[in-house]
Image: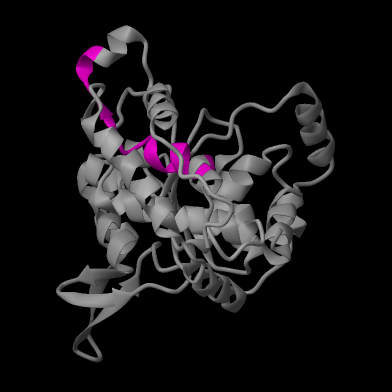
Amino acid sequence: MNRKVELLVENIGKVMVGKKEAIELLTLTMLCNGHALIEDVPGTGKTTLAIALAKSIGGDFNRISCTPDVMPSDITGFNMYHPKKETFEYHKGAVMTNVFLADEINRTPPKTQSGLLEAMEERHVSVDGTHHKLPHPFMVIATQNPIEYLGTYPLPEAQLDRFMVKIRIGYPSVEEEMMVMDRFKISNPLDTLESIITLEEVKMIQDEILLVKQHKDVSKYIINLVKATRNSEDTLLGISPRGTLFISKMAKGIAYYEGRDYVIPDDVKSIFMSVACHRIVPRPEVKYENKSNEDIISNIMKFVSVPEGDLFA
């Protein structure tokens, strides 16, 4: 295991009890220079997880509660006229930070949601024709409630596709919930959580992950999985080329975390569901067969042949 990444996961785990898989997934998404969508019911620790990550890397953190009255300029920033200087000055929006949390993103209208598109893809925002570069590292973490749909605006496919992974946290077990009660009995552990890694080290790890090797057979395996989502009888829309790149990046992140400098098929299989599930659009009749997106992806993984061999470096 890579010790730096392991320490980062352990540090976040001081706040999030028993949710190691979700912590690892969010951490690796950030180290792979991606964005994450966390979908779960209220009170499961979505916001806590985002704040814990920002604190653990010593980065700046901004949060917006995405209500219907939030404007795009609240996210991107705006120009204001300065009478004494007789010029317009740029006032930073909430997105000018290292970790930006868009809380309940589907509660804000599409016009405001679209304010994030450029930031997520281009790593800058445009205000009155001028580009303003975002800090590096930069990550968007968006949350949404999968149960309540009244007064919400579903994210369009173009925006969903920009999220590298979709994460579900889930309810804790009885033992874990007892630990939560004990840990939060006197104070919130977030208040005393300290950074375990610097922003410079995050950038260094991001660069090192890009150097992880991927054999052409593993690349073909990824492409065959992607093609299967496009050709499936259960889907209207399969995984995009952007999704293909994200699968490769996350597989490299898993390999790096495991202490390897090369990707194996198991790395791809371990992250494929999280990267692929929110990218496919099932056919309308599929819901009458009680098939979820997870079921469709699981079936595809069963029927796509896995490359064989001992070394995939």
**Residue at the far top in the pictured view:** 288
Between 176 and 79, the one lying in front of the other is 176
x%, y% of residue 61? 53, 62
User: From the viewer's perspective, is 209 left or right of 221?
Assistant: right
Relative to 7, residue 207 above or below: below
Q: Magenta segment range?
A: 270-285
The quarter of the picture where residue 262 lies is bottom right
Quadrant of residue 134 within the rendered picture? bottom left
Residue closest to the eye, 41 or 294: 294
Kindly identify the residue that appears in the image at 33 percent across and 49 percent down: 243
Considering depth in this image, is 290 or 134 the residue closer to the camera? 290
Instruction: Indicate whether residue 276 is drawn in magenta.
Output: yes
* Quadrant location of the N terminus in the rendered image: bottom right
Question: In this rendering, is residue 198 above or below 18?
Answer: below
Q: Residue at x 45, y 60 (%)?
A: 215
Query: Looking at the image, which residue sits at the far front?
Result: 309
Q: Position of residue 170 (x, y in %)?
A: 59, 29
- Describe residue 128's horizontal placement relative to residue 69 as left or right: left
